[in-house]
Image (cartoon, grey):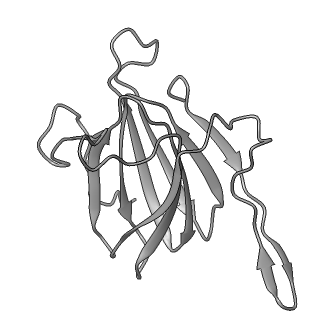
Amino acid sequence: MINGVKVKELKAIPDERGHIMEIFREDDEIFEKFGQVYITTAYPGVVKAWHYHKKQTDNFACVRGMMKVVLHDSRTGSSTKGEINEFFIGEHNNLLIQIPKMVTHGFKCISDYEAIIVNCTTECYNSKNPDEYRMDPHKSDILYDWERKNG
């Protein structure tokens, strides 16, 4: 596991009306601070990658569909520099993934329908000076193949 990445298992509590699932609480061990909450979606097969933040920690939970979330540790001086982590999250694997500052990340929708990630960040988005640094998902220094792995 990349140094600083934390994972919390989420538990759906069903009854005859539906279900409830807590995602993130201020009394969680992994809680840092609240910035904002937003959703991001991807259509089947779409890759949204790579990017990182210098100030912001992300907290991803996929609440519809399935996403492959990939992290790459490109932090200078990190004990896990160069390591890649893959997480398959969503309806069949309810997890919250905490992505530290400076850890490059992206995701791909692996369900047959649009998937939705809820992200609870530690910073508010600043459109005049965004804390978002992007790289091409297929042409970067990160040696990762976004294609499905069969077998």
Q: 6 left or right of 74?
A: right
Q: Where in the figure is residue 107, as x and y percent of width and height?
A: 37, 55
Please, which residue is most extreme toward the right here?
A: 15
Displayed quadrant of residue 110: bottom left
Q: Residue at x 50, y 27 (%)?
A: 2
Displayed quadrant of residue 56: top left
Residue 77 drawn above or below residue 13: above
Residue 100 drawn above or below residue 76: below
Please, which residue is most extreme toward the bottom here?
A: 16
For the residue pair 41 and 94, the one nearer the viewer reads as 41
Q: Where in the figure is residue 147, as x and y percent of width and height?
A: 26, 58
Q: Quadrant of the C terminus?
A: bottom left
Q: Quadrant of the N terminus?
A: top right
Q: Where in the figure is residue 123, as x and y percent of width and height?
A: 47, 41
Q: Where in the figure is residue 25, as x and y percent of width and height?
A: 74, 49
For the residue pair 35 and 151, the one nearer the viewer reads as 35
Q: Residue at x 61, y 71 (%)?
A: 91
For the residue pair 145 and 141, the one nearer the viewer reads as 141
Residue 121 drawn above or below residue 55: below
Q: 134 left or right of 9?
A: left
Please, which residue is most extreme toward the left here?
A: 139
Total marks shown come to 0
Q: 17 left or right of 51?
A: right
Please, which residue is most extreme toward the front here?
A: 128
Q: Residue at x 45, y 18 (%)?
A: 80
Q: Residue at x 51, y 74 (%)?
A: 65
